[in-house]
Amino acid sequence: MAAASPTDKPTACLALADGTIFYGRGFGARGETVAELVFNTAMTGYQEIMTDPSYAGQIVTFTFPHVGNVGVTPEDDETAEPVAAGMVVKWDPTEPSNWRATSELTQWLEAKGRIGVGGIDTRRLTRAIRQQGAPHVALAHDPEGRFDIGALVAKARGWRGLVGLDLAKDVTCAQSYRWDEMRWAWPEGYRSRSEPGLKVVAIDYGAKRNILRCLASAGCDVTVLPATATAEDVLALNPDGVFLSNGPGDPAATGAYAVPMIQGVLARDMPLFGICLGHQMLALALGAKTVKMNHGHHGANHPVKDLETGKVEITSMNHGFTVDSQTLPAGVKETHVSLFDGSNCGIRVEDRPVFSVQYHPEASPGPQDSYYLFDRFAAAMRARRAA
């Protein structure tokens, strides 16, 4: 069935695999793209969301209507290029009003080859995603309004989906590099580390820049390695600790090559910290399992309870798979849970400096509820050095 179209001629079309059609006004790049459709409830950060590598293979519906009002700036990119396949919004992006803006969202999307559609009933679309699960969709933008609806629906139905799909290889770095940029601070902006620090190897499954900045600000000298790095590659750098980054796709698929590496590092009994996909990779390496969620967690207002302290953190999340806490082996404790649905949000290995969380402590939703995790990682490395 077709959703009500805007009064003016539609120039974009969103076709769901079940045959539901949403018409709207296109902006950004022209053409077609096929992906999984998710919704994000954050009120800010649309540029960071579009450039988050964890959104590979997905189109993002923004539930907050004001998208584009602060423009874009290269300082807010989480990676070099947008990774999300497209965006769906209620109101068309407006002219930006922000002193940091260097470009408009519509111009940026066009230059980066990403499709946007406005004029969509995002409340209805969000309800459909919650009820039916994240659907496969085809998004098309044509200024002339010419759409082959049957072909778009067929493409949505024919898309293979994220289950069994390894996307970390598509978004990881091509070669290793050093990172020394720290968190943004007024009035200097981004500053670089100059003094010696703790040697950290960060495995890039789709790492966000602000995670690396938080590591640098916590006193770490960071060397980033590609997702396919082996335990030998990691240990050859003689690190004080190893970090496992966020990333997209099915963790079980990425685990085919990531798990042996992690198990090799665990055998050396060094501090290890994981975030998002890195959390799932650690869980798999320890013997647990992951499962696909109905519509996932995507937003900046997710309450998470620390089971060991009783405190509640307001967190940023972006994941469509979750660790099945019922499969955690002996010696691995569940440390955090979502207060939305009780799903697992953190683990640690008993009596070892090995831990991970499902959410994004670097994204500042609390705004500083979760920064202690980077300090905890640094403290574990200092303790190992001292021993």
Image: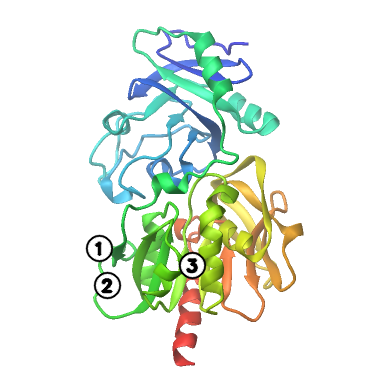
Under circle 1, the secondary element is: loop
Number of residues whose C-alpha sits closer than 10 Å to that of mark 1, classed few (under 14), some (14–19) or many (20 or more): few
* Picture colour scheme: rainbow
The residue positioned 53% from the left and 66% from the top of the image is 262
Q: Earlier in the sequence, mark 3 or mark 1?
A: 1
The three-letter code of the residue at mark 1 reads: Pro
Checking the image for residue 332, the label placed there is none
Residue 371: horizontal and vertical position, in percent? 48, 67
The residue positioned 39% from the left and 51% from the top of the image is 172
* Count of numbered circles on the image: 3
The three-letter code of the residue at mark 2 reads: Arg
Q: Camera-side residue: 265 or 145?
A: 265
Residue 52 seen in the figure = no
**Residue 262 vertical position relative to residue 206 in the rendered view, above or below:** below
Residue 295: horizontal and vertical position, in percent? 63, 38
Residue receiving disc 3 = 371
Nearest to viewer (mark 1 / mark 2): 2
The three-letter code of the residue at mark 3 reads: Tyr
Q: Camera-side residue: 385 or 259?
A: 259
Q: Earlier in the sequence, mark 1 or mark 2?
A: 1
Nearest to viewer (mark 2 / mark 3): 2
Label pair 2/3, CB-CB below 8 angstroms: no
Residue 324: horizontal and vertical position, in percent? 71, 54
The residue positioned 73% from the left and 66% from the top of the image is 329
Residue 148: horizontal and vertical position, in percent? 47, 8
Under circle 2, the secondary element is: loop
Residue 198, quarter of picture: bottom left
Q: Camera-side residue: 91 or 269?
A: 269
Checking the image for residue 187, the label placed there is 1
Residue receiving disc 2 = 193
Spatial distance from mark 3 to mark 1, Cα to Cα? 21 Å
